[in-house]
Image: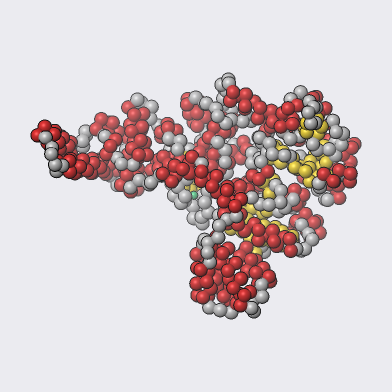
Amino acid sequence: MEERDAGAVAAAPARSRKRLEKVYIPDHLVEQIRNASDIVEVISGYLPLKRRGREFIALCPFHSEKTPSFNVIPHKQIFYCFGCQKGGDVFKFLCEYESISYPEAIQRMAERAGIEIEYEQGSDSQERARRETLYRIQEEFTLYWHEQLLQGTEAQIARDYLSRRGVSEQSILDFRLGYSPLAWEDTIRKAEELKLDFELLVESGLAIQKEGRGDGYGRFRGRLMFPIADNQGRVIGFSARALHPEDSKMGKYVNSPESPLFHKSSVVFGLDRAKREIIEKRCAIICEGQLDLIACHAAGFKNTVAPQGTAFTLEQARSLKRLAPELILCFDGDEAGQNAAVKALDTFLAADLTARVVFLPAGSDPDSYIQTHGAEAFGELISRAREFFDFYLTRLAQQNNKDSDRGRRQIVQAMGEALLKANQPLLTDTYAQKTAQLLGVNPQTILEEFALCKKPQFPTTYRFETQEQTAGPDAAEEKAFAPPSLREQWLLVLFLMNEAEWDWLAQGFQPEWVQHRHIREIIVTALDQYSAGEYSPHQLLHSFPDPFSQRLLCAAMAEDPQKIPEPALQLQKLVLALRSQHCEQLLHSLNQSLTAPGLSIDEQTELLQQKERIRQIRNSPLFGV
Ligand code: ZN
């Protein structure tokens, strides 16, 4: 296998990448890009794949599991997980894994393969050009401020600060830290030099327009600049720390405002750099600040990220969940830190993550802890992280008097509510025992008490996001989607593995024999493509972008034909059975019509003739059978 991998693509410099949203890419080009993007090569850039027979397997990155059910099938160029039913082609994998749009995934693979996509003219391309410029502005200023920090005389204050904080030269280079000069007009001057549009500079959040005037000034002045990148490593905003005492009234930290690129609630600082390691370690360490994160990375804990801002949001939790099933929350051991840990509970449970917690000695953060005690001691601490519910139970016991009836009730109630949110019977059972032990009662009693706890609602903020999630077009369809019968699922499997039977099917098969809309449409489309000489598994997948058809198709394609005896014969029998079933239903309804009162002789004759025709169809051989 070639050494190129998709991870390297993800880290490519931002300026070579064009942003795609609503772009039309001709089918032949999509095909060309797909042919150049071997699915095994691409996915193995993200996950360790193990060969098993003709296929490759791995632990699924989309759900948590202990034995691999994620399959990559090279000869069909698809992936499919038997556990969570996610599947699709190479582009689909990228969409799911990197949370990017389908066109973006195509674009990424095109870049990887060195295939040029030509863009059409029009408003879409204008919009794209605008976004491109916004990315360019962030990138240009990252470079400019980085240079200032490394060489500018004025930046001595920043260099001194970093050396006091023990940030190494290497970390400064790795994280492209910067310094924004103090002068009000410096950002504007630099933008003019770079020929950047003033309006876009304001939109990017780097400059502020003076009220009612055509000019403005830089937002960040005399600050230490931390570039914030998206998951693909493109800079989308900054976090800026005050260095000059007169500036700190603006706040110790100032972040980029919300912009078309920067959405504070979804950004996870350092995720672009930590992604690989999080996948490998199957766990992400969460710390609070940028300097903590840099210290952790420098000490070798490269699976560390920091939520942007103080609260850990559901969106952030979801992007982590895609990479690993577990979080280690790293908090200050003081009262505020312990409260923050409790507050994070709803968020990680809502994202279906498990969490452990590490408390540092009160008043210290990962940065200062590593400086004082060294990386090894910090590693010790991480490895001894406590299960979240253990910590929670201890905390409840500290906060409530377990010798009073009221205190005991409160402990059981709070514990029961938290476990209900987690909704894992094993966990509930384990902690019923621990709670029982703590209170000196029978575990069965605690389990019964837990069962009485009312299932709490997630706080409004989370509920809002959940609603938004379920309100998407996919979700609406998901509700409307009823899974096909086992028989029709099996039909699709047999159909796809028996291309040799398609000649007679193309002539003799009637769509109405199949009840499930998605299966029916897939088969009809495949036969049409086949008759036109245009069929390929990719082409078929490409024709059904909706998630349900994708899932049905991939599930069917992932079945191993070698495990199915006499597939052609089975297919013939099944098609016949479906035809019979359909005919019986028609006959039944015709019989009902015949019993209706007041039928004319002509009507009766017509119905009887229809019955006869259907009987003939039912009893006639199928083509080739
Ligand atoms: Zn899965």
Residue 262 location (% of width, % of height): 68, 39
What quarter of the picture does the C terminus occupy?
top left
Horizontal and vertical percent for residue 471? 51, 43
Which one is in front, 214 or 529?
214
- Give the quadrant of the N terminus: top right
Q: Is residue 113 visible from the viewing direction of this image?
A: no
Q: Residue at x 52, y 51 (%)?
A: 63
In the figure, residue 20 lies in which quadrant?
top right
Color encoding of the figure: secondary structure
Q: Is residue 583 above or below residue 456?
A: above
Residue 388 visible in the displayed image: yes
243 horizontally vs 295: left or right? right
Left or right, 535 with respect to 581, comes to right
Q: Residue at x 50, y 68 (%)?
A: 451
Residue at the far front in the pictured view: 598
Direction from residue 207 to residue 116 in the image, left or right = left
Q: Residue at x 11, y 35 (%)?
A: 600
